[in-house]
């Protein structure tokens, strides 16, 4: 929408009514540092109207450098409208939706848009065409939650140069803006090329060529981009071929490794089984041999013990026989002696007694000697038996030690055979585990790639959903702002601006009935105002010539001059604002100071 001087007057009245001071909080780190230009040169005195989603407004004015700046709080959306009396407007959307207070403390972002304004043509039909182009944002900045940055809408950036070129052509200043459009396009193309955004860069350089077809720089850059794209595509193909080759080699290597691992496993299992069988057979043979040797040694020991016992028993029997024989001889001698003693009792009483004494002594001596010999024999026989028993015990101990040693050696062999079999099995299990781990790793990689792809698709879907949701929110916010703006304009009787705002709201949400109702109400108010401003009414009310009235409205000094000629009356207004600007109107339409003076002062 093109803002005419009278509308500008009403806008400032609204801004005064709704004015407020934004306090720059500790978390306001998102900032805009814009520049407003005309024919590529700074434009001083342009008004920058900032409206948030609640309809609250803030008005800034560009300085001698055409610059303005503003800090934006988080989680809010703003419409920025840049205009100046006699010039076209420029709209920007700036959104911090989704930016939390905590995140804003760490975010430092400055956007630096350049807004080109053009002089308004006098043709109303042309102004309507300009409205169709400019009654929508030419630039948009939004908070990117994934990157934690304030980004610019690439689609609007790509179409900006074309839109400005159309406006320049309609406003009749195409030749004066060619250089500006050319420079803007080159700057955008160079930045996009540096960021390797080849599509955006090509679009920008093509816009530059459209502005100045004879320039070689854009053509050179376009050729460079084509080379870079071709090189990237060639590299992509080469990388894909190399990736495919490596994948095939890996697949072949994996298959070969798998076959080798399986064969090695089979050979290891066969070797382990064969060795285990051999070790088992050897262990069984050694055990049988040791058992046979032990049985033989036990048999020899038993035979020897039996033989020794038989010899001892024979010696004992012989000893007993000799003792019996000796005892019989003694008994026989005793009987003969008794007989002799009986026959010679009397004669040999003394001799017999002596002989008996001697015999007894001798018998005692012989008995003592026999007892001693028997004791010595028994001692020797016991010593011999003890020696035999000791030898037998020693032999049995030795045999037991040999048997234990053989059993220990057999156990050691069995242990070694078992340990080797376990070691071989562990090696085979490790090889199998390694193979399974590699297969699992490969399967995990495939699963991860699939999961990543699914996650990427889900994230993309979520982004699209959020973008759509944000777009709906943006449309709703614009709709609400347009309704609020229209209502504000109605309050200050800026009916044309109100109607334009309600029309914008209707275009945003065609199904809503409120804009149509409000447009009808505004049309009725406009008709009423027109009827009240009929010039013949002024002629009836005021005398012929010029009648001057001075009033004060807010911070503005108003000078009204009613000029009556015959039955025709015209209302001329001079409005001197509190901030230094002066505007002139005839019957509500903007005029120049010269027209005001010519049509009023010459008749005084």
Image (spheres, helix red, strand yellow):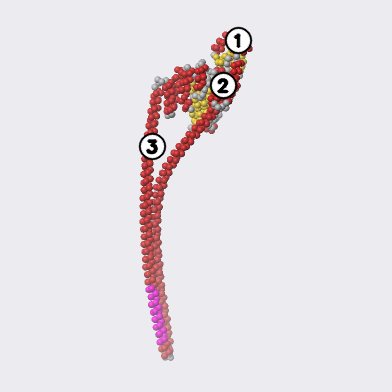
- Compared to 433, does 295 lie above or below? below
- Give the main secondary structure of the magenta stretch: helix
Quadrant containing the C terminus is top right
- Can you give x and y, in whole percent of width and height, for residue 300 in the image? 37, 68
Alpha carbon separation for disc pair 1 and 2:
32 Å
Residue under label 1:
567
- Compared to 212, does 562 lie above or below? above
Q: Residues within 10 Å of mark 1 (few under 14, many from 20)?
A: few
Q: Earlier in the sequence, mark 2 or mark 3?
A: 3
Number of residue marks: 3
Image quadrant in which you'd find residue 536: top right
Q: Residues within 10 Å of mark 3 (few under 14, many from 20)?
A: few
Residue under label 2:
499
Is residue 328 among the parts visible in the rendering?
yes
Q: Residue at x 59, y 9 (%)?
A: 565
- Compared to 536, does 443 lie above or below? below
Alpha carbon separation for disc pair 2 and 3:
63 Å
**Secondary structure state at the residue bearing disc 2:** helix
Left or right: where 253 falls relative to 27: left
Left or right: where 305 falls relative to 588: left
- Can you give x and y, in whole percent of width and height, for residue 464 in the image? 49, 32
Residue 243: image tag: 3
């Amino acid at each position: 929408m093109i803002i005419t001087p009278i509308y500008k007057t009403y806008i400032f009245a609204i801004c005064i009514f709704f004015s407020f001071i934004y306090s720059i909080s500790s978390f306001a780190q998102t900032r805009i540092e814009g520049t407003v230009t005309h024919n590529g040169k700074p434009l001083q005195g342009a008004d920058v109207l900032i409206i948030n989603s609640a309809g609250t407004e803030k008005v800034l004015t560009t300085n001698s450098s055409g610059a303005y700046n503003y800090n934006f709080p988080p989680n809010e959306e703003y419409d920025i409208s840049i205009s100046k009396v006699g010039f076209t407007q420029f709209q920007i959307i700036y959104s911090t939706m989704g930016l939390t207070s905590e995140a804003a403390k760490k975010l430092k972002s400055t956007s630096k848009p350049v807004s080109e304004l053009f002089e308004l043509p006098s043709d109303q039909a042309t102004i309507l065409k300009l409205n169709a182009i400019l009654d929508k944002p030419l630039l948009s900045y939004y908070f990117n939650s994934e990157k934690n940055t304030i980004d610019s809408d690439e689609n609007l950036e790509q179409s900006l140069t074309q839109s400005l070129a159309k406006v320049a052509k309609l406003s009749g200043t195409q030749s004066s803006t060619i250089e500006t459009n050319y420079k803007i396009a080159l700057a955008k193309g160079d930045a996009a090329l540096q960021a390797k955004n080849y599509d955006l860069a090509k679009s920008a350089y093509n816009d530059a060529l459209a502005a100045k077809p004879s320039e070689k720089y854009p053509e050179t850059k376009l050729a460079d981009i084509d080379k870079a794209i071709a090189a990237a595509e060639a590299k992509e193909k080469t990388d894909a071929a190399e990736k495919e080759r490596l994948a095939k080699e890996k697949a072949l290597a994996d298959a070969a490794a798998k076959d080798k691992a399986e064969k090695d496993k089979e050979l290891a299992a066969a070797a382990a089984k064969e060795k285990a069988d051999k070790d088992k057979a050897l262990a069984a043979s050694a055990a049988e041999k040791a058992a046979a040797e032990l049985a033989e040694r036990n048999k020899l020991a038993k035979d020897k013990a039996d033989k020794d016992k038989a010899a001892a028993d024979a010696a004992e029997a012989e000893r007993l026989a000799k003792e019996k024989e000796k005892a019989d001889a003694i008994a026989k001698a005793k009987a003969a002696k008794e007989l002799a003693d009986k026959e010679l009792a009397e004669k040999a009483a003394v001799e017999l007694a002596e002989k008996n004494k001697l015999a007894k002594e001798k018998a005692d001596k012989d008995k003592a000697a026999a007892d001693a010999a028997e004791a010595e024999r028994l001692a020797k026989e016991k010593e011999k038996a003890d020696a035999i028993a000791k030898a037998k015990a020693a032999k049995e101990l030795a045999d037991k030690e040999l048997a234990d040693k053989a059993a220990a050696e057999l156990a050691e062999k069995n242990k070694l055979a078992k340990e080797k079999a376990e070691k071989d099995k562990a090696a085979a299990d490790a090889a199998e585990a390694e193979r399974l781990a590699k297969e699992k790793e490969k399967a995990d990689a495939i699963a991860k790639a699939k999961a990543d792809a699914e996650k990427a698709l889900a994230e993309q879907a979520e982004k699209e959903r959020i973008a759509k949701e944000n777009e709906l929110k943006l449309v709703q916010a614009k709709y609400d702002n347009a309704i609020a703006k229209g209502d504000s304009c109605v309050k200050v009787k800026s009916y044309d601006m109100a109607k334009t705002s309600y029309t914008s709201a209707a275009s945003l949400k065609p199904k809503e009935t409120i804009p149509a109702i409000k447009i009808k109400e505004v049309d009725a108010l406009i008709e009423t105002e027109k009827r009240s401003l009929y010039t013949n009414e002024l002629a009836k009310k005021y005398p012929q010539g010029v009648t001057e009235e001075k009033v004060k409205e807010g911070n503005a000094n108003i000078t009204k001059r009613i000029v009556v000629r015959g039955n025709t009356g015209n209302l001329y207004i001079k409005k001197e604002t509190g901030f230094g600007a002066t505007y002139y109107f005839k019957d509500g339409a903007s005029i120049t100071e010269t027209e005001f003076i010519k049509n009023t002062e010459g008749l005084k």
